[in-house]
Image (tube, rainbow, N blue to C red):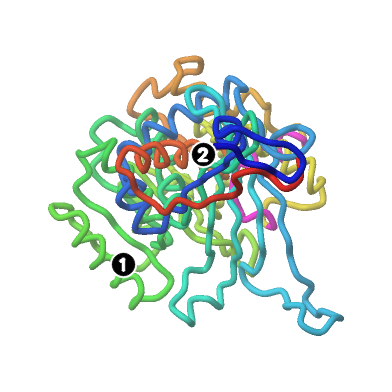
Amino acid sequence: MCLTDGSETMTASEHADTQINLIWLSEQDMIDAGVTDTAKCVETMEETLILLDKGDYRMAGASANSHGAQINFPDEPEHEGMPANGPDRRFMAMPAYIGGRFNNTGVKWYGSNAENRKNDLPRSIHVFVLNDTVTGAPKAIMSANLLSAYRTGAVPAVGVKHLAVENAEEVGIIGPGVMSRTILASSITQRPSIKRVKIKGRTPASTSRTADYLREKHPGIEFSVVETEQEAIENSDILIAGTSTSPDGPQGFPYFKKEWLKPGALVLAPAAARFDDDFITAGGARLVVDYKGLYAEWFNENGPDVTYERLLGIPGNRWWDMVQEGTLKESDIANIGAIANGDAPARSNDEEIFFYSIGGMPVEDVAWATDVYHQALEKKLGTSLNLWDIPALS
């Protein structure tokens, strides 16, 4: 049998070489493929963070360290139909390549608008495209809200694995949103000794709903709602800062006062958090980040006039500002990948306090997408889509 593209005759085998098929994975397909497997996701994120520390990756920008490209809207648009700025209103593309056994490239694309919650939709709606690194051909298009949520929860748990006290029993959560839920679930896989969780939220009703949800998900653990940040922080072995930025600036961020911190505490900060600068510079806590290159690139992209409170309040940005100011040395900050690989010291005693800042990077999405994709293929999940048999233009 021969096929023709209008100018020459092609054999069936030659046609097969040009055909590109991919799979579409719905949210249910992703669940069936194991996207919510927290323990496995922590393992994958540990591999990813080690590859980052070794340099076997690429992200956007000239330095290959950019978080991604973002579209924002003006406060007062001049053109009809253009949206106005609003809470969490943006579009973002986050491309990356990760090497090692993954050796894949992809991009997470999402739109975000806090107003979505009024219509029972998530604040952000994500899709992910996984590509062949050599040809650029798409392998899969995925529903990606769960992909993003579970890798976001697993990256802090790599810190729990290497930095938390061995028999951690008590967790304090400030900001009990989806992110804090997945961080807790991932942390429990690394410290099954966890017995008690205290939750501080913004409103009593939503905080109580979260506590009920967590009691159902994690039977055998005691959950309680507390009124103040101090109550959540005191006596906690692991702390989760899960709130967004505040219009009040750093004064509105969760405040981890040194007198409240238990010796040996680990603070996981994937969102806004405030620490006293003098505690930081005095060496009162060991400082760890997911990857220093990310914070350096945020600084380069935004310049010294954009302070960390305008960059989600993630404390690693403040630490990088301090490095540029000369009040902190870069060597005072460690990559978690270096610690995980034994190239930097982990916890040396039960008294050390650790602050772990997490900014989130698209390499993590690519890695977890790769593992979920292979599980989907093994289980024959998803809907096959044809890009072309023979490209019309080549």
Where is residue 373 shown, x and y percent of the image? 42, 41
Measured Cα–Cα span from mark 2 to mark 1:
26 Å
Give the amino acid at mark 1: Thr
Side of 301 relative to 370 (left or right): right
According to the picture, the residue beneath numbered tag 1 turns out to be 210
Main SS of the magenta segment? Answer: helix
| Quadrant the C terminus occupies | top right
Q: Of marks 2 and 1, which one's residue comes earlier in the chain? A: 1
Chain part drawn in magenta: 310-324
In the visual, does 177 lie left or right of 217?
Answer: right
Residue 314 located within the stretch drawn in magenta = yes
Q: Secondary structure at mark 1?
A: helix
Where, by quadrant of the figure, is residue 224 drawn? bottom left
- Three-letter amino acid code of the residue under disc 2: Glu
Question: On screen, 64 above or below 309?
Answer: above
Label 2 sits on residue: 364
Q: How many residues crowd around disc 1 within 10 Å: few (fewer than 14), some, or many (20 or more)? A: many
Q: Give the x, y percent position of residue 331.
A: 63, 23
Kindly give the residue lying farthest to the front in the view shown: 1
